[in-house]
Amino acid sequence: MRFSVLILGLLPLLAFAADDGDGKAPSKPDTLPAIQPPFDFNGIIEKGLMDNLHPTPSHIKYLTGNKMPTDCMAHAKEKNHGPDEFEVFEVYYEDCHVPWVMCRLKDTHVNATTMADTFGRMPLGMREFVKHVILFKPKDLPGAAAWDAGDVIAISEDSFRLYVLAHEMSHSIDAHIEVPGVTPSGKGGLSSSKRWAEQYALDNATVSDYARTLWAENLAETGIIALYNIVVPNGVANLQHNSPRQVFHQYATYTTYYRDIITPGKNQTCKQRVPDSKMVYWPDIASDGVPTETRTKKVGITLMEPGAFDENVTFVQPPAR
C-alpha cells in the first residue's frame, strides 16, 4: 500500500477541527521550524517529478511581426527589454482547445521546445490557471527564481524546473479555487483560512524555510510535496530521511482540497482555462503601450477580484544540494 493512501485515509479522523472558536492564527507561519534535513527540491524531488510527469503531446507556432500578449510586453518593458529581444510562440497541447502563449528572451539557454515540454508535463488542472509564461535571465529577477502576477509566471532560465512551476501554480490554485465552508463563497484563499492555520498547527515543521515567510508561501511550497506524493510511486515514503510525517497535515490538507486538480488525467475538459491577455503589436501601439488595467503588481499569488491576497512576494530558489 502506498504511504500516501494510508495516511490520507486517516485525515478526516485526525485533522479537521471546526472553524469556530476564539483561537487566532499567528500572523505568519514561523512558529514551526523548517524540516531538517531540508527536502532536496533540486535533486530527488525534481527527478521524481520529471520521471513521472510525462509530456503532453504538443506543437509550437511561432508568432512574427512583434506580436505578443500585452502582459508579456508590460513585463518586458518593466525590465527595459525591447520587442526584438523576444521570441513569442503559441503551444497547442492535445488536452486543451486553447493554446498557451509563451515569451522568452532569445539569449536564454532554455529554448521554446523545452519550455513547451516542461510546462506540458504539469497536470492540466494546474496549467489551466496560467495565462502566459515569460522566460527571463536571472538578472531580470534579482533574488528570485520566479514570480506570479495576474496569472502570468515570470521565471528565470536557471530555475525552469517542475517544482518551481508547481509552487507558482499552487498560488493560482489557492487564489482561484473556492473551498466550501472554508473560503468565502466564490473565492479562493485556503492559505489565509483558519482551517489551513489549524492544520499547520498540528504539524512539527514546515516543508522549507521559505514556507515560514507568509501563509501563501507556506501553501505554495507545500503544493510541491503534495504533487510529488500524488505522482511519484511510493510518494513521500521516498523522503523518509526527512521524516515527512512532520509536515503531514499541511500536504494532506492541500491534497484533500486540490486532489483532482493536481492529479494527471483527472481533468481532461480544459473548461477553467483563464483567458489570455490581449494580443498587441509592439511597438506599433499608442501611448506607452501599457493600459492601466494591466499594471498588476508582482505577487506570489494570482491577483483576484476582489484581491484575495496583497503580499508582495517572490519565490526564492533553494540552494543546490
Image: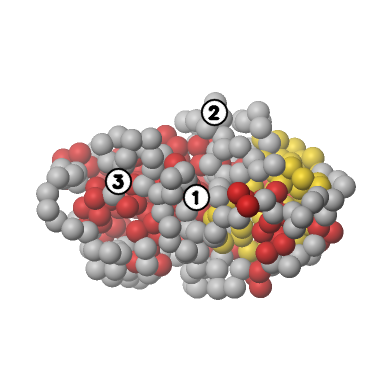
Relative depth, front residue between 296 and 12? 296
Q: Quadrant of the N terminus?
A: top left
Q: Position of residue 272 (x, y in %)?
A: 52, 32
Which is nearer the N-term, disc 3 or disc 1?
3
Q: Is residue 68 above or below residue 245?
A: above
User: Real-space Cα distance between discs 3 and 1?
Assistant: 20 Å
List the single residue furthest toward the right.
Answer: 65
- CB under 8 Å between discs 2 and 1: no
Residue at position x 53%, y 41% in the image: 129
Dividing the picture into quarters, in which one does residue 279 lie? top right
Q: Amino acid at mark 3?
A: Thr
- Label drawn at residue 130: none
User: Real-space Cα distance between discs 3 and 2?
Assistant: 25 Å
Classify 10 Å Cα crowding around label 2: few (below 14), some (14-19), many (20 and above): few
Q: Amino acid at mark 1?
A: Thr
Q: Which residue is mark 3?
A: 253
Q: Which residue is mark 1?
A: 302
- Colour setting: secondary structure
Q: Report helix, strand or loop for mark 1.
A: loop
List the single residue furthest toward the front.
Answer: 287
Judged left or right of residue 103, residue 261 is left
Residue at position x 69%, y 54% in the image: 290
- CB under 8 Å between discs 3 and 2: no
Residue at position x 24%, y 63% in the image: 26
Mark 3 or 1: the one toward you: 1
List the single residue furthest toward the left.
Answer: 21
Residue at position x 49%, y 50% in the image: 303
Q: Report helix, strand or loop for mark 3.
A: helix
Judged left or right of residue 294, residue 244 is left
Q: Is residue 240 visible?
A: no
Q: Which residue is mark 2?
A: 271
